[in-house]
Image: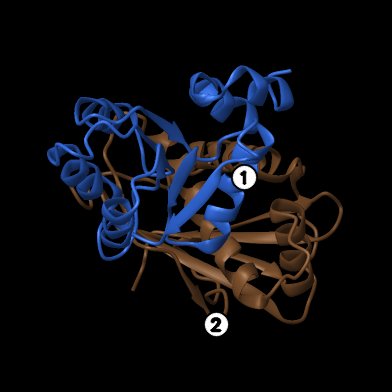
Chain colours: A blue, B brown
Amino acid sequence: MRILIVDDTTTARLFAQKCLANIGFHDAEFMQAGHGIEALAKIRACPPDLILSDLMMPEMDGETFLKILKAEPALQDIPVLIVSSAGNPAHREILLAMGALDVLPKPFSTTEIYEVLKGFLTEEEDADGWGD
Amino acid sequence: MAGEIDIFCKEPGEKRPQEKALAQAVNSTFEKMGFMEARPTDGEATQGHAITAVIDILTPSPARIFFSAPQQLGWNIAETFYGLEEMTMEAVGDMMKELLNTITGSLLSTIMPNQQFQLSIPRLCPELPAPQASSYVYQFNIDNKGIITIVLTDNPS
């Protein structure tokens, strides 16, 4: 399992990685990007199985990144979970219509991210992680 | 429309809605990110060097929020949140920006649930602003390890 975390702060990326490891993705290969442009370059070079992306980032924000990704046939099936403090119900609906897997508001707990992503865990990973 | 929405209600004699929403946002952020408790307090923040971050609310109504913590407390929070063995001041600054971003988004989502809002990218700044009539100061005790200060102002200039 290869997971790309897109966020402009190092600590936010580390926090997300720590949460994912805690819920069972401890054997995942983690990739990181600081904004949408860097993320697209990394995805084209080495497509991940799952993407977590913030919305507010310099260079290219998360919404633009999602729009471009979902327009590329080779990449559009990669699930993208948006994690952001800038969301509200109306914006959430827009992002879901654009193809986001889900929109998780910050702050999120380990339990909340587990509920969204448990379907991506193997039975073994699930048993090793938060769900057991 | 900008300028027509009073984000930080200033009705005299009434409990301002942002106080409760801010307390919720701060407590939820600290609890979910680090299992830490944040209690409103009137105590004195530790004197000495502090780390301060600022974010602008661009729409629907211009405002600015500052977030400051004594350096040692910032260090302790970052260690708790991220569990890093080797912490750096850059990581602590990053964490302050991320915390402010999260608290602000949570606060605005609560006080204007059906309103779109736009925020700037948070940044570090040298210090908190001098007290002024259009600003509100709130303090929170973090796990009895120290006090953080949050300043809301509807006068970003």
SS type, badge 1: helix
Residue A88 seen in the current view: yes
Please state the horizontal and vertical placement of residue B154, each as a whole percent of the image: 38, 59
Please state the horizontal and vertical placement of residue A79, each as a whole percent of the image: 34, 32
Quarter placement of the C terminus of chain B: bottom left
Marks 2 and 1 close (CB-CB < 8 Å): no
Mark-to-mark CA distance, 2 and 1: 22 Å
When asked about the image quadrant of residue A83, the answer is top left
The residue lying at 78 percent from left, 77 percent from top is B47
Residue for badge 2: B126
* Residue B68 appears left or right of B43: left
Choose the circle earlier in sequence order: 2 or 1: 1
Residue for badge 1: B26
The residue lying at 35 percent from left, 51 percent from top is A46
The residue lying at 47 percent from left, 67 percent from top is B54
Q: Respond whether the residues carrying marks 2 and 1 are from the same subunit.
A: yes
The answer to whether residue A47 is above or below residue B55 is: above
Of B35 and B85, which appears nearest the observer?
Answer: B85
* Residue A99 appears left or right of A46: left
Disc 1 marks which amino acid? Val
Of B109 and A63, which appears nearest the observer?
Answer: A63
Of B55 and A72, which appears nearest the observer?
Answer: A72
Disc 2 marks which amino acid? Pro
Q: Residues within 10 Å of mark 1 (few under 14, many from 20)?
A: many
Please state the horizontal and vertical placement of residue B79, each as a whole percent of the image: 76, 60
